């Protein structure tokens, strides 16, 4: 792991002015030997002042790259913008709401840095770290979606819907992403599996929020996830050859 690498952390953000700066500071504080970081923050048409905070962070911190959508388009759309701006040879997704801890980066990146993995998924259900106890039916829904995805991809993930996903740049360059909202998760899972990418899973901690605290995903996103699992696995769309 002595070779110098560059990690791009892509942060899609929508109305998270209260937590964004703290997330960016936590990301900056993580030190990984042999890895330089850039932080790509994409404001997805926020209305609470998040856009101004993104601009301020980019002006204050040399490793922060800011971008802004004029209107809300969804997490998947913000990630596509961020992936397009990312310069790193490893790209990792980070939410801006403090549910996930950047202290987990070392474990997430280790399989890629060792040359064992092309893609690494976090897992909220297989780690030994702290997990806030929140919504039971969200847990059940996640299990159902992950199981359905696994049945069609023939990979044995425990947490397909997890935020933390890290990719070798070459993998992202071989797939075409289409989903604008939370359908990104089943779509990218189907497409990296279709490529035959080497996929690892690493346990992560989780500090989930309630809806009163700002959680955004809802039952309609679950319905869309089922549609995306069927669409991107059965129709096999959007993936180019792995060679």
Image (cartoon, rainbow, N blue to C red):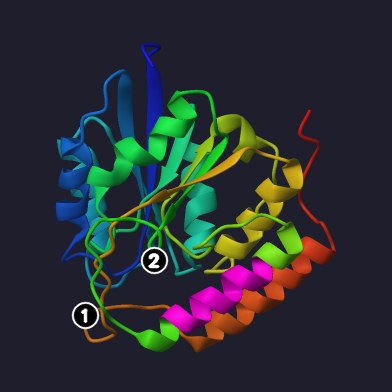
Give the side of residue 119 with respect to residue 14, left or right. Answer: right
Q: Which residue is mark 1?
A: 213
Give the side of residue 121 with respect to residue 41, left or right. Answer: right
Furthest residue toward top: 2
Q: Nearer the viewer, mark 2 or mark 1?
A: 1
Alpha-carbon neighbours of circle 2 within 10 Å: few (<14), some, or many (≥20)? Answer: many
Q: Position of residue 173 (x, y in %)?
A: 65, 36
Along the line of sight, the residue nearer the viewer: 211 or 87: 211
Residue 148: within the magenta?
yes
Alpha-carbon neighbours of circle 1 within 10 Å: few (<14), some, or many (≥20)? Answer: few
Furthest residue toward right: 235
Q: Position of residue 198 (x, y in %)?
A: 63, 37
Q: Which residue is mark 2?
A: 45
Q: Position of residue 161 (x, y in %)?
A: 50, 65
Give the residue at x 33% y 33%.
38
Q: Which residues are magenta?
A: 139-149
């Amino acid at each position: 792991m002595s070779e110098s690498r560059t990690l791009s952390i892509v942060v899609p953000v929508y109305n998270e002015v209260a937590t964004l700066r703290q997330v960016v500071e936590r990301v900056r504080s993580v030190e990984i030997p042999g890895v330089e970081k850039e932080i790509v923050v994409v404001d997805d048409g926020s209305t609470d002042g998040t856009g101004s905070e993104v601009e301020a962070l980019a002006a204050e911190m040399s490793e922060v790259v800011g971008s802004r959508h004029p209107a809300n388009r969804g997490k998947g759309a913000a990630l596509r913008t961020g992936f397009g701006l990312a310069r790193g040879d490893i790209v990792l997704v980070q939410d801006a709401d403090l549910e996930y801890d950047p202290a987990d980066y070392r474990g997430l990146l280790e399989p890629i840095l060792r040359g064992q993995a092309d893609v690494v998924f976090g897992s909220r259900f297989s780690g030994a770290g702290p997990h806030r106890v929140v919504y039971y039916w969200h847990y059940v829904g996640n299990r159902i979606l992950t199981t359905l995805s696994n049945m069609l991809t023939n990979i044995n993930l425990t947490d397909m819907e997890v935020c933390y996903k890290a990719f070798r740049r070459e993998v992202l360059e071989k797939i075409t992403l289409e989903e604008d909202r939370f359908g990104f998760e089943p779509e990218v899972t189907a497409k990296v599996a279709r490529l035959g990418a080497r996929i690892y899973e690493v346990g992560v901690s989780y500090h989930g929020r309630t809806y009163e605290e700002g959680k955004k995903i809802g039952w309609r996103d679950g319905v869309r996830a089922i549609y995306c699992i069927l669409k991107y696995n059965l129709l096999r769309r959007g993936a180019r050859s792995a060679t």
